[in-house]
């Protein structure tokens, strides 16, 4: 799209908004161009800019059939364009809810305003960028839509919820405070009026949502950071632990390469090992992460994490010992 065409389209949009419509004849006279040029402008607006532009036979005018449509003017640096492009590539992989497709559509609409040579460059960049995300839990579109409506209006929500260790659903009425995306899953931080507690609920375990008539007010002293840790997890609790973990020389450099937590401190040891220290309340998630390092890490503190790791190792030992005993018995059978 050339500069002259862009200027015409911006003015056409303004005319339709101000007057409610326009004719091809008035546009050809105003811009001193042919009807073919105006028709090309209309086609570009409809096909590339997704404008709801139609001819109204009763008014004998070209009008917008959707009054909420707007034609934004875009002014972006090359770096901002690249950042937006890469963001759209990431959004392509966060599609557990069908509604997220609208985000990609929004980017395509913005990209349509860019010069043709920039659009080509973005295409080349996107074709050479791959995003690998965590596995996602599928969500119900109905749960998502009703829940986001309740969040916007501070409305109570009634739904059926299943705990992770239970196949049966139970009815819950909740005051939804905040949505959190974490490692491919969506979670709701909500207050239960019945129990008087703030807890975390997985959206993938919800069904049959109903928007209740009652409303609620979020307490002024509520702080989301009191219930989640952006680096480590979504378990709703206020208590915090002082973690101190010793990593072997074989993985010390890998640990140093990452920022694991905003409060982290590292201490290099004479033997090449590394001690990583930080504060967090997410002992369950951190425990799973520690187990993934196997014998490359030793828990120094807290004692609760040390016990958790020992219990898990004991359970694994029992499990494999039982399986080995079964194999041994079968070999003699």
Image: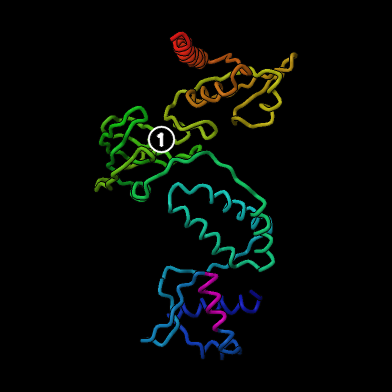
Relative to 333, 232 lies left or right: right
Image quadrant in which the N terminus is located: bottom right
Question: Compared to 212, does 109 lie above or below?
Answer: below
Q: Position of residue 313 (x, y in %)?
A: 51, 14
- Return the residue found at the far front: 333
The residue under the point 62% across, 52% down is 86
The residue under the point 48% across, 11% down is 331
Q: Can the viewer see residue 197?
A: yes
Q: Which residues are magenta?
A: 39-49
Q: Which residue is mark 1?
A: 221
- Does residue 47 belong to the magenta stretch? yes
Say which of 307 and 96 sits in front: 96
Could you tell me what secondary structure mostly forms the magenta stretch?
helix
- Does residue 177 belong to the magenta stretch? no
Question: Compared to 321, does 78 lie above or below?
Answer: below
Image quadrant in which the C terminus is located: top left
SS class of the residue under badge 1? loop
């Amino acid at each position: 799209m050339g500069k002259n065409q862009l200027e015409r389209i911006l003015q056409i949009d303004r005319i339709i908004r101000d007057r409610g419509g326009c004719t091809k004849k008035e546009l050809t006279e105003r811009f001193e161009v042919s009807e073919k040029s105006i028709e090309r402008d209309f086609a570009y607006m409809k096909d590339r800019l997704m404008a709801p532009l139609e001819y109204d036979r009763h008014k004998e005018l070209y009008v917008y059939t959707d009054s909420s449509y707007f034609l934004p003017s875009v002014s972006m640096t090359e770096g901002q364009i690249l950042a937006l492009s890469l963001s759209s590539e990431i959004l392509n992989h966060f599609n557990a809810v069908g509604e997220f497709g609208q985000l990609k559509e929004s980017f395509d609409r913005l990209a349509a305003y860019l010069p043709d040579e920039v659009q080509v460059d973005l295409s080349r960049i996107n074709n050479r960028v791959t995003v690998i995300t965590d596995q996602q839990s599928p969500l119900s579109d109905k749960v998502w839509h009703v829940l986001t409506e309740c969040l916007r209006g501070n409305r109570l929500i009634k739904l059926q919820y299943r705990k992770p260790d239970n196949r049966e659903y139970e009815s819950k009425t909740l005051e939804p405070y905040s949505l959190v995306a974490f490692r491919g899953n969506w979670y709701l931080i909500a207050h239960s009026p019945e129990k008087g507690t703030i807890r975390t609920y997985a959206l993938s375990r919800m069904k049959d949502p109903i928007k209740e008539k009652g409303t609620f007010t979020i307490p002024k002293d509520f702080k989301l950071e009191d219930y989640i840790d952006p680096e480590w997890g979504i378990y709703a609790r206020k208590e915090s632990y002082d973690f101190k973990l010793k990593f072997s020389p074989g993985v010390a450099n890998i640990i140093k390469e990452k920022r694991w937590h905003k409060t982290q401190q590292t201490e290099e040891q004479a033997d090449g090992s590394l001690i990583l220290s930080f504060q967090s309340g997410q002992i369950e998630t951190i425990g799973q992460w520690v187990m993934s390092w196997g014998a490359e890490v030793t828990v120094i503190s807290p004692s609760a994490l040390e016990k958790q790791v020992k219990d898990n190792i004991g359970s694994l030992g029992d499990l494999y010992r039982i399986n080995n005993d079964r194999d041994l018995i079968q070999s003699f059978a």
